[in-house]
Image (cartoon, rainbow, N blue to C red):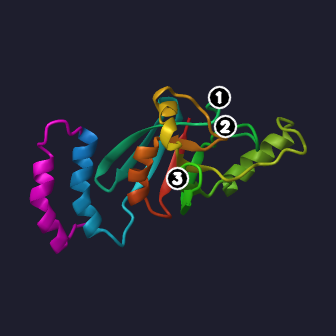
Amino acid sequence: MKLRFSPAYYALAPLLLLMAFVPGNNKKYVHKSAGVARKFATLAENPYYIIIDKSDYELKVFDDEGWYATYPIVFGSKDLSDKMREGDRRTPTGTFKIVLKKIHNKWGPELLLDYPTAESFRRFNERKAKGQLPANAKIGDGIAIHATRPEEEWTVDNFYNWTDGCVSVKYSEMKDLFSYIQVGTRVTIQP
């Protein structure tokens, strides 16, 4: 795929190049600033996908050129295995997509996932059939990638798992992620 750049890119290109050499800029920021030009060129497309690695407590964003950004994250339970049922505070594993972007009244920017998927239901029903879950267990729903509260970014710094099974990003960094991730973006959550 050949990228075509808009006139806005050529207006921003000198600034983006200059930003790459500003002391204190980290690799993530430099790489993302270069990505601004791609956003102008691919506004109608969605070049991003997300991989969440529970064992590393990281959310990584990739685009059609490779790695794009990394954000530290936390979950609900210290048990990082697959979500078994509603109320267990575990984060599900599997492949999902973002179905809704909204601003939550407590923690701000939120990206709602399409959990439970057909695969989630298959595993849930299999576990029920094997007696691994109570007969009255429910699968649950409402799994999202969302921010911490503004004053609780320390939870991510200290790996404090506090959600009911969602993925939590620092409030300041979630605003950045929310600004460019679109509905329909694929999200893979791995153990």
The spot of residue 61 in percent (x, y) is: 39, 48
Say which label, 1 or 3, has the lower sequence index. Answer: 1
- Cα separation, mark 2 vs mark 1, equals 7 Å
Report the magenta residues as a range: 1-26
Q: Quadrant of the C terminus?
A: top right
Q: Residue at x 49, y 38 (%)?
A: 151
The spot of residue 102 in percent (x, y) is: 54, 61
Q: Which residue is mark 2?
A: 90
Residue type at mark 3 is Gly
- Cα separation, mark 1 vs mark 3, equals 26 Å
Q: Quick check: marks 1 and 3 in contact, CB under 8 Å?
A: no
Does the stretch in magenta take in 81?
no
**Which of the 4 image quarters holds residue 12?**
bottom left
Say which label, 2 or 3, has the lower sequence index. Answer: 2
Q: Relative to 7, is 185 on the left or the right? A: right
Say which label, 2 or 1, has the lower sequence index. Answer: 1
**Which of the 4 image quarters holds residue 86?**
top right
Q: Which residue is mark 3?
A: 108
Residue type at mark 1 is Asp
Residue type at mark 2 is Arg
Foreground mark, 1 or 3, reads 3
Q: Residue at x 81, y 48 (%)?
A: 138
- Cα separation, mark 2 vs mark 3, equals 21 Å
Q: Which mark is residue 79?
A: 1
Q: Quick check: marks 2 and 1 in contact, CB under 8 Å?
A: yes
Instruction: Check disc 3 and report its element: helix, strand or loop.
Output: strand
Image vertical order of residue 22 relative to residue 121, above or below:
above
Q: Residue at x 23, y 52 (%)?
A: 33
Q: Residues within 10 Å of mark 2 (few under 14, many from 20)?
A: many
The spot of residue 46 in percent (x, y) is: 39, 64
